[in-house]
């Protein structure tokens, strides 16, 4: 059975789950590329000794965050620290982009599969009520078809949950490494100014 035949033979639930899985996979490729770029920038950032060496860092969100921190014109240390915190939060939001959607798919996919199963069982029992229990093969085929919805929901949920937890972990790690290096650069810049 080809993918096209499988797509055409199944109900709207399997089609919806298939589209959701395709979106999750596309987002996963985008996240992997984003992590590759971020690790490359982190390597460049590790070679920096102070914030005046921003020219060594290629263009991107990490560099623009650092430039915003360097160019901050606040009048107190408290405002500067608040600005650093905001920039770190914004960088974390950038790194977590599309991760919550993947988590949402992981949570909703089994529920959508169960809704499809309940609708299918409803139709199977409606058919039994119309034709009676004369042919158990009809009931068996109907039950087999409705269980595909549950299985599809669980498969999509497992795949999405693996991506979600992996991306959540990687994003947190990258943000932590960026934050540690940023505070090291700020400390070194303060020490050189004193």
Image: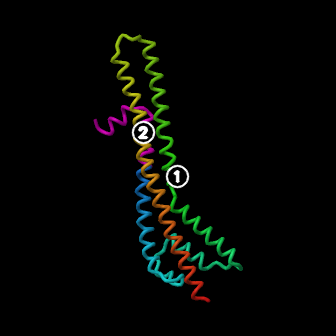
Q: Residues within 10 Å of mark 2 (few under 14, many from 20)?
A: many
Measured as percent of width and height from the top left, residue 65 is found at 56, 72
Measured as percent of width and height from the top left, residue 108 is found at 50, 41
163 and 124: which one is in front?
Answer: 163
Residue range of the region highlighted in magenta in the rendering:
1-23
Quadrant location of the N terminus in the rendered image: top left
Measured as percent of width and height from the top left, residue 26 is found at 42, 53
Identified at 47% across, 38% down, the residue is 110
167 and 36: which one is in front?
Answer: 167
As measured in the structure, the alpha-carbon distance from the residue carrying label 1 to the one carrying label 2 is 18 Å
Query: Does residue 87 appear to the left or right of 176 in the view shown?
Result: right
Q: Which dot marks residue 6?
A: none
- Residue farthest to the right? 75
Identified at 44% across, 12% down, the residue is 130
The residue labelled by disc 1 is: 100
Quadrant location of the C terminus in the rendered image: bottom right
Q: Which numbered disc, 1 or 2, marks the residue that appears first in the sequence?
A: 1
Does the magenta run of residues contain 16?
A: yes
- Residue farthest to the left? 1
Measured as percent of width and height from the top left, residue 123 is found at 46, 22
Identified at 54% across, 79% down, the residue is 185
Provide the secondary structure element on which disc 2 rests. helix
Classify residue 6 by image quadrant.
top left
Q: Which dot marks residue 154?
A: 2
What sort of colour scheme is used for the picture? rainbow
| On screen, residue 116 above or below 78 | above
| On screen, residue 188 above or below 9 | below
């Amino acid at each position: 059975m080809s993918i096209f035949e499988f797509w055409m033979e199944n109900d709207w639930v399997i089609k919806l789950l298939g589209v959701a899985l395709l979106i999750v996979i596309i987002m996963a490729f985008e996240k992997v590329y984003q992590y590759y770029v971020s690790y490359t920038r982190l390597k460049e950032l590790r070679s920096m000794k102070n914030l005046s060496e921003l020219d060594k860092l290629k263009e991107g969100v990490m560099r623009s965050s650092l430039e915003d921190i360097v160019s901050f014109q606040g009048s107190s240390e408290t405002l500067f620290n608040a600005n650093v915190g905001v920039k770190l939060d914004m960088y974390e939001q950038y790194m977590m982009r599309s991760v919550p959607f993947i988590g949402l798919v992981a949570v909703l996919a089994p529920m959508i599969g169960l809704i499809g199963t309940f609708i299918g069982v409803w139709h199977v029992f409606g058919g039994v009520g119309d034709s009676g229990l004369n042919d158990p093969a009809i009931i068996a085929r109907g039950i087999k078809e409705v269980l595909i919805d549950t299985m599809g929901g669980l498969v999509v949920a497992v795949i999405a949950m693996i991506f979600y937890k992996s991306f959540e972990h990687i994003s947190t790690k990258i943000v932590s490494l960026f934050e540690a290096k940023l505070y090291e650069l700020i400390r070194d810049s303060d020490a050189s100014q004193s």
